[in-house]
Amino acid sequence: MPTSRSSLAGLACLLALSACNGGAPSTGGASSNASTSNTAASNAAVPPLPATPWKPAAIAHGGVGSPPDRVDGCRRAVDAALAVLEAGGDPVDAAAAGVVVLEDDPRFNAGTGSRVRIDGKTVQMDASIMDSSGRFAAVAAIEAVKNPVKVARAVLDTPHLLLAGDGATRFARTLGMPPYDPATDEMRAKARALQDQLRRNDPALPERWRKFDWRKHYNFETPILETGLESPSPARSATPGRSTDTVGVAVRTVDGRFAVALSTGGTSITLRGRVGDVPIYGAGLFAGPRGASAATGEGERIIEAALAREVNAWLEQGTSPDDAARRAVDAVVRKKGDIGVIVIGPTTMAAAANLPMAWAGRESGSNAWLGPIPDGGKPPP
């Protein structure tokens, strides 16, 4: 039946309304209706941005659930980011430099040390980057590269926002990046332990996976039974997928700009091709004129909340980074998902999480560190 003019007019109105509201309603944190209705009142109370020069700063996290004693890795990431800023580099390059440090540290689930999937051999990674002028780029389900964030940074210079799968991997080859296996022996062993749990429908598995017919929908090339069997230790099988360990770095510059970058090896217990929050615009990260944030946690819940974009809206309304970080955690925990977030603003920075999390922050020229201090209060070497 031909579409009526009235139907087309109605569709046009709906599209116009959607565009005015950012394309999709927010489902997490403060409601979009409440945010819209309070915008005028909030703007009136928002203090002006401080005059530049600002103190350059960087903050990094190692992922929700990452042991706080890995704060040394986060501090090295902060140092790398600040070195770029202090040399006058672009803030996106500073954020990427910090993330590269974490990707190269096999203790974190990004780059080397990324999680191996349930087939026992596949590693698919995501990364993204954004600055406060609105530039954004990402890669999703990229394979066989050492530093996914470097690929995302290169996408920033293309006409595209996101490259995925084989296309992202092939693009990395055009950049001169050779094939690289990011899996470690530890991650392969954990994947074999997870396979055994799946076969037994272990009660330690997430409930949604115990109820899901994964055998029917298994979409990896290698059958799960061909990859071997290893009896899991309690430490390996107690909470599969609990720690997601996305890594992130956010920076601010002397001239009043922000940038942020994320990278992740994803989760082990997924179908091939699963993509989390990291490469989704406004979900895992966001940067605006009043600050930047980088999330870590259960990707599906972060996407549903459009979390980083919500954090940006709170910052624009005058919310402090500390309050915005805590509010973000509350928004996702209510949806029964693990969550951590770092937030940086013009004068302060903060982190919050519902599980232990390694993170660190520092201003340029200062020896004072923010973040968890292990070993009875002694800073790590």
Image (cartoon, grey):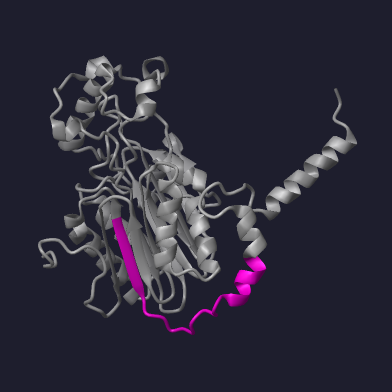
Residue 200 part of the magenta segment: no
Q: Residue at x 32, y 76 (%)?
A: 86
Q: How many marks?
A: 0
Quadrant where the C terminus is found in the figure: bottom left
Q: Does residue 157 appear in the picture of this structure?
A: no
Region of the chain picked out in magenta, as a range: 39-61
Residue occupying the point 54% across, 68% down:
316
Is 52 magenta? The answer is: yes
Placement of 59 over or under 144, stated as above or below:
below
Q: For the N terminus, which image quadrant?
A: top right
Q: Residue furthest right?
A: 5
Q: Report the side of 235 relative to 311 (left or right).
A: left
Q: Is residue 371 above or below residue 7?
A: below
**Residue 74 image point, x, y percent:** 24, 60
Which quarter of the picture shows residue 342? Answer: bottom left
Residue at 73 percent of width and 50 percent of height: 17
Q: In the rendered image, is residue 353 in sight?
A: yes
Where is residue 276? Give x, y as percent: 42, 41
Report the residue at 16% width, 56% height from top.
Answer: 69
Q: Nearer the viewer, residue 280 or 34?
A: 34
Q: Nearer the viewer, residue 41 or 54?
A: 41
Q: Nearer the viewer, residue 95 or 158?
A: 95
Q: Is residue 246 left or right of residue 3?
A: left
Residue 31 horizontal/vertical position (percent): 58, 53
Work out whether residue 226 or residue 151 is closer to the camera in this orientation and state it: 226
Please state the horizontal and vertical placement of residue 94, each as a whole percent of the image.
35, 65
